[in-house]
Amino acid sequence: MENSMLDRIRVAAGYIRQHVDKIPAIAVILGTGLGDLVSHIDIKAELDYKSIPGFPLSTVEGHSGKLIFGSLGGKYIMAMQGRFHFYEGYDMKQVTFPVRVMKELGVETLLVSNAAGGMNKEFRVGDVMIITDHINLFPENPLRGRNDDSMGPRFPAMTEAYSHRLIDLADGIAREDGIRLMHGVYVGTQGPTFETPAEYEFFRVIGGDAVGMSTVPEVIVANHAGIEVFGVSVITDLGGKDVKEVPTHEEVQRAAIKAQPVMTHIIRKMLERL
Ligand code: HPA
């Protein structure tokens, strides 16, 4: 990685340190329609992305673009309300820049959420799926280019990209509270098109349970940086050759908003136990 990248990461982290009293060890990235978790945070500080040097700006509907610091489930956390998507035109280094900044700030655990289309025939709209693994179908890997060994290894293993410890923690909470919690493999695609029926079928055949346009880049960089990751998808639509409904962004947002309480409950309880 070129030095200017490292400089930009340090400048952004320095700015955040200057404007926030305390830096958390846990970060949460909130996906489409899943920003409501923020209303449960006892907020201590907020920074607009546009005020942080080096941060790209969030453009898509449903993403307001703020870094929020405060307490949830008795833990002090930072939450990204809105993320950067490859389909918006950002390059992979921009998409994953906030994760590099988190690492520079000392974040050790990252909880990521997203809205996703379900291919698994057992899934229903509104289901919450723990991501157990992913398939990276983005056209570019965020680690492409010269590797800075101080940030992570040239060839990082991805055998446990999603922490088994954190998956077990979420499963335990779901069992105790009688929550229907699915498990599955997330297929990451560049978008912005939703899938053709044949593509949904193809993603099912290759081992995917849900598909979405985010998360994979951030998870790759978090793993490279040695950050422990937990990922969760809200199933907002279903895809496949026998599915007649046409997915829209509005429908995705509506379904995500409806499923938010379950996701928020799980994340809050996980934070209590971390
Ligand atoms: N495909 C891709 N991304 C998505 C979908 C989908 O069906 N639903 C929500 N995000």
Image (cartoon, grey):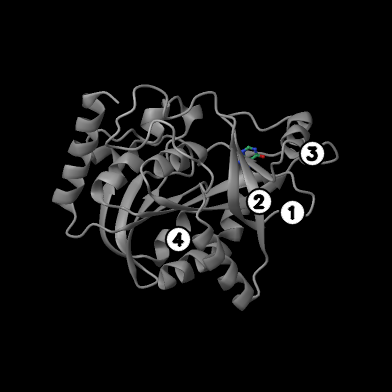
Q: Is residue 126 left or right of residue 76?
A: right
Q: Amino acid at mark 3?
A: Gly
Q: Amino acid at mark 4?
A: Leu
Query: Between tags 3 and 4, which lies in front?
Result: 3
Q: Is residue 218 above or below residue 180?
A: above
Q: Which mark is residue 184?
A: 2
Query: Quick one: SS at disc 4?
Result: helix
The residue drawn where x is 30% and y is 33% is 149
Q: Residues within 10 Å of mark 3 (few under 14, many from 20)?
A: many
Query: Between tags 2 and 4, which lies in front?
Result: 2
- Residue under pointer 4: 37
User: Label 3, label 4: how many angstroms apart (C-alpha)?
Assistant: 31 Å
User: Label 1, label 2: how many angstroms apart (C-alpha)?
Assistant: 10 Å
Mark closest to the chain's N terminus, 2 or 4: 4
User: Label 1, label 3: how many angstroms apart (C-alpha)?
Assistant: 12 Å
Q: Amino acid at mark 2?
A: Gly
Query: Quick one: SS at disc 1?
Result: loop
Determine the residue located farthest toward the right in the rendered image: 242
- Residue under pointer 3: 240
Determine the residue located farthest toward the left in the rendered image: 18
In the image, 206 versus 111, the foreground residue is: 206
Q: Residues within 10 Å of mark 2 (few under 14, many from 20)?
A: some
Q: Which mark is residue 123?
A: 1
Q: Is residue 261 above or below residue 135?
A: below
Mark closest to the chain's N terminus, 2 or 3: 2
Mark closest to the chain's N terminus, 1 or 3: 1
User: Label 2, label 4: how many angstroms apart (C-alpha)?
Assistant: 22 Å
Label pair 2/4, CB-CB below 8 angstroms: no
All told, the count of numbered labels is 4
Determine the residue located farthest toward the bottom in the rendered image: 176
